[in-house]
């Protein structure tokens, strides 16, 4: 028995799609393509591609960090943020008010001193 196989020119595989969920905390905008996000939004991205977006803080606010399940997957190149879409991703863009930035850093320094120093700020010995 002889079998003949022919190719079908019209047959195309549909790309695998991953979801990118972006949440915004604080006052700022994430721009994914042409769409601005200022709360929560889901995007469909083709698997194996990079999703690119930019960050813009509102007046008197600063972009602080990426958090969420995939916050560490962000790559920043010349103010453009990218994430490789090899799976569904969830990100949180965190914006903080300008006036909290200085006090937050000061608080982190005090915490660091309490951990690293031999005495706490009340001059009481720290148990190890």
Image (cartoon, rainbow, N blue to C red):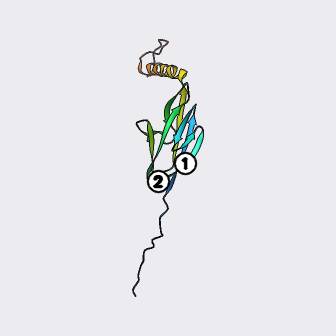
Task: Give the class, few, some or many, for how many residues have Cα within 10 Å of label 2's Cα (few <14, many ≥20).
Answer: some
Numbered label attached to residue 77: none
Taking the spot 48% from the left edge, 59% from the top edge, the residue there is 15
Categorize mark 1 by other alpha carbons within 10 Å: few (<14), some (14-19), many (20+). some
Residue 9 in sight = yes
Q: Residue furthest right?
A: 39
Counting from the top left corner in percent of width and height, residue 50 is at 44, 47
- Secondary structure type for disc 2: loop
Q: Give how far across and how far down residue 34 sits, in percent.
A: 53, 44
Pick whichever, 98 or 119, lies toward us.
98
Q: Residue at x 55, y 48 (%)?
A: 43
Task: Quadrant for the C terminus, please.
Answer: top left
Query: Whole-Å distance between the Cαs marked 2 and 1?
Result: 12 Å
- Measured from the top left, where is residue 23 in percent x and y? 56, 39
> Which residue bears the numbered disc 1?
43
Q: Is residue 118 above or below residue 62?
A: above
User: Which residue has dot 2 on it?
Assistant: 47
Quarter of image, res 21? top right
Q: Nearer the viewer, residue 81 or 105?
A: 81
- Is residue 127 something one can see in this rendering? no
């Amino acid at each position: 028995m002889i079998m003949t196989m022919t190719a079908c020119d019209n047959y195309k595989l549909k790309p695998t799609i991953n979801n990118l969920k972006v949440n915004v905390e604080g006052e700022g905008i994430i721009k994914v393509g042409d769409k601005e996000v200022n709360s929560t939004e889901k995007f469909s991205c083709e698997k194996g591609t990079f999703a690119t977006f930019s960050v813009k803080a509102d007046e008197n606010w600063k972009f602080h960090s990426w958090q969420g399940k995939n916050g560490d997957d962000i790559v920043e190149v010349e103010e453009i943020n990218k994430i490789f879409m090899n799976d569904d991703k969830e990100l949180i863009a965190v914006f903080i008010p300008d006036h909290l930035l200085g006090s937050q850093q000061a608080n982190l320094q005090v915490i660091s001193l309490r951990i690293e120093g031999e005495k706490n700020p009340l001059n009481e010995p720290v148990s190890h």
